[in-house]
Amino acid sequence: MTAAPPAPQTSSAARGTGRRSLAAALLLGALGSTVVLIASGQTWRSGTATVAGIGAKTLEADGQAVTGVPAALAIVALAALVAVFAVRRAGRVLVSALLALSGAGAVAASLLGAGDRAALDEQAAKLSGDAAATVSGLTQTGWPYVTAFGGLLILAAGLLALRFGGKWPGMGGRYEREGGPRGRTAARRPADPERPEELWKALDRGEDPTAAPTREG
């Protein structure tokens, strides 16, 4: 008869994978959101507008003026990164999907906004008092693409959460998996009927506080 592989080794490998994926997702999500927030505040485009009485004037538009979507999605991603530990099962899948979509949206908005001149034309119109005024000599920096890179990091964090989030711990001891070290300890030790708080904790774990403890082995 073929022997089954040792369960402790399988469980240890699963925990190791969960810890590594958790650390990677936290790093990617936090770093990506920070990159997006910083890069979207830098100058994305510049140009020259001709103003009567002043002459040629250089105008600049940062990422927030071009499109505020990447920065807003970075904040959503940070919130989702925290919320993913407060929910379980289907809720964790939904929050992980939100995290991934935030990254994808930041990438798309950054790339679409890289060639947008509307913010500069609006500045030129206000400065000259002519609604039809536009800018010329447009130049573009690399910051939109840095923002898009940050969005890719957020997207990667979301994909890791979708793939490995089921192996991650929850927030607080009550969310630990049954069969873990604390779960086994609680199963061996019955609730003290003279301590109401222990009875409530046993009920919260789904145990019968009046049942006699089972002997292992």
Image (cartoon, grey):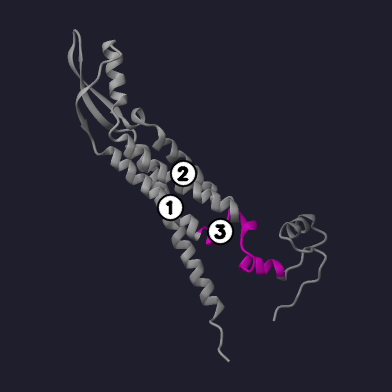
Q: Horizontally, is 71 left or right of 207 in the view?
A: left
Q: Horizontally, is 114 left or right of 5 in the view?
A: left
Type of amino acid under label 3: Pro
Q: Is residue 95 above or below residue 54?
A: below
Report crowding for label 3: few under 14, some 14 to 19, many 20 or more residues within 10 A (C-alpha).
many
Rendered-image quadrant of the C terminus: bottom right
Q: Which residues are magenta?
A: 165-187
Can residue 155 be spotted in the picture? yes
Q: Quadrant of residue 2?
A: bottom right
| Of marks 2 and 3, the one in the foreground | 2
Q: Which mark is residue 169?
A: 3
Report crowding for label 2: few under 14, some 14 to 19, many 20 or more residues within 10 A (C-alpha).
many
Type of amino acid under label 1: Ala
Q: CA distance from mark 1 to mark 3?
A: 16 Å
Frontmost residue, 46 versus 15: 46
Q: CA distance from mark 1 to mark 2?
A: 9 Å
Q: Which residue is label 1 attached to?
A: 157
Residue 154 image point, x, y percent:
41, 48
Q: Residue at x 33, y 37 (%)?
A: 112
| Of marks 1 and 3, the one in the foreground | 1
The kind of secondary structure element at disc 3 is: loop
Residue 106 image point, x, y percent:
39, 41
User: Do the numbered discs 1 and 2 sit on residues whose CB atoms are within 8 Å?
Assistant: yes
Q: Residue at x 23, y 21 (%)?
A: 135
How many numbered marks are there?
3
Q: Earlier in the sequence, mark 2 or mark 3?
A: 2
Rendered-image quadrant of the N terminus: bottom right
Q: Which residue is label 2 attached to?
A: 77
Indicate yes or no whether the magenta region holds residue 172: yes
